[in-house]
Image: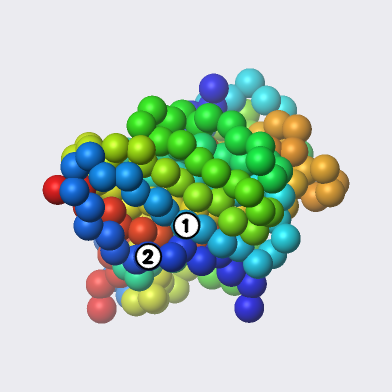
Amino acid sequence: AQTVTQSQPEMSVQEAETVTLSCTYDTSESNYYLFWYKQPPSRQMILVIRQEAYKQQNATENRFSVNFQKAAKSFSLKISDSQLGDTAMYFCAFMKRTGGYQKVTFGTGTKLQVIP
Amino acid sequence: DVKVTQSSRYLVKRTGEKVFLECVQDMDHENMFWYRQDPGLGLRLIYFSYDVKMKEKGDIPEGYSVSREKKERFSLILESASTNQTSMYLCASSMGGDRGVFGYGYTFGSGTRLTVV
């Protein structure tokens, strides 16, 4: 079974600064996907960024980027120029290709507070 | 705007009641999932369905059942609610892998906060 570990239950960052959220995972699979999801206080979970394991290039979406280290099984999220709207729970997630199911395994989350 | 809709944002039920949580998606997704979210535990998979009338147990199915009679609707049933089922319940959907499209993750509903007293 896959496991996803987020070792930082809570973090804070000053507005306009950069913050990095950590995530490690354990799997014997070679073909998989990794995600970061954001859950603002209003609770709707949305996808922030995704990474395909067979692509070495790190994914980037505007102010969000990842540092994907496949050998180390590490997948950290960097948020640049933090904004108040980035305040949320962030979940790291793993998905292997299992037939048509595409189940996702989530970490325990990191609560990020952006301070004005 | 495509979406996943959960019928209730907040529910309060009594111990022993039968509880239905409803989820509807309008994206023609094959896969649908029910998770519960608890502080410090993240999201844990209860049940999922990859086709109409098909269901699979997730990691914590005890005390729950599901129903999927139509492609767009996936119901979670608590046969006899207990206080340890007080939680946030999240429904999600995704395209099936049989379409040849993989790895695009889920679309989530807004969640149902269930309190069992």
Name which quarter of the figure residue A19 lies in.
bottom left
| Mark 1 in CB contact with mark 2 (< 8 angstroms) | yes
Disc 1 designates what residue? B22
Q: Is residue B114 above or below residue A82?
A: above
Q: Residues within 10 Å of mark 2 (few under 14, many from 20)?
A: some
Chain of residue at mark 2: B
Q: Residue furthest left?
A: B117
Q: Which mark is residue B8?
A: 2
Camera-side residue: B54 or A24? B54
Residue at position x 51%, y 31% from top?
Answer: B58
What kind of element bears circle 2? loop
Where residue B44 appears, as percent x and y from the top left, is 42, 38
Total number of numbered labels?
A: 2
Instruction: Name which residue type carries label 1.
Output: Glu
Camera-side residue: B116 or A79? B116
What kind of element bears circle 1? strand
Camera-side residue: B88 or A62? B88
Q: Earlier in the sequence, mark 1 or mark 2?
A: 2
Taking the image as shown, residue A38 lies to the left or right of residue B41, namely: right
Instruction: Name which residue type carries label 2.
Output: Ser
Q: How far is mark 1 from mark 2, CA to CA?
A: 8 Å
Q: Report whether residue A72 is seen.
A: no
Q: Same chain, marks 1 and 2?
A: yes
Q: Which mark is residue B86?
A: none
Residue at position x 66%, y 53% from top?
Answer: B70
Residue at position x 75%, y 32% from top?
Answer: A99
Where residue B81 appears, as percent x and y from the top left, is 27, 41
Quadrant of the image containing the N terminus of chain B: bottom right
Q: Report whether residue B84 is seen.
A: yes
Name which quarter of the figure residue A18 lies in.
bottom left
